[in-house]
Amino acid sequence: MEIRFKTSLKCQGCVDQVAEELTSTFGVEGWKVDLNTNPKILIVKDNKEELVIDILQKKGYTAERISE
């Protein structure tokens, strides 16, 4: 299952700020950010929506699930 989130991430530097915690939680292959979209879309291969939102909020970013 993949969940997509609209985020307030702006660039690779922003992604780098959340990468360590996302990787330790979901694994290297468990998440990715599409930097070619506006807003940037975070895709997580897990159904832990609240955990994803919490990780980004702790780093000062927002994440909102996108309905598929």
Image (tube, rainbow, N blue to C red):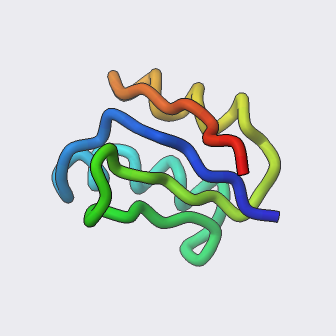
**Residue for point 32% across, 44% down:** 39
Residue extending furthest toward the front: 68
**Residue for point 28% across, 49% down:** 38
**Residue for point 61% across, 51% down:** 4
Spot occupied by residue 2 in the image (x, y as percentages of width and height): 73, 62
Q: Does 47 appear above or below 55?
A: below
| Of the pair 27 and 5, the residue shown nearer to us | 5
| Of the pair 62 and 51, the residue shown nearer to us | 62
Residue extending furthest toward the bottom: 29
**Residue for point 50% across, 32% down:** 63
Check the picture and name the quadrant holding the N terminus.
bottom right
Spot occupied by residue 25 in the image (x, y as percentages of width and height): 65, 53
Spot occupied by residue 44 in the image (x, y as percentages of width and height): 63, 58
Examine the image and state in which quarter residue 62 appears. top left
Q: Does 13 appear above or below 30?
A: above
Drawn side of residue 12 relative to residue 54, left or right: left
- Total numbered labels placed on residues in the image: 0
Drawn side of residue 7 relative to residue 14, left or right: right
Spot occupied by residue 51 in the image (x, y as percentages of width and height): 69, 34
Drawn side of residue 62 relative to residue 40, left or right: right
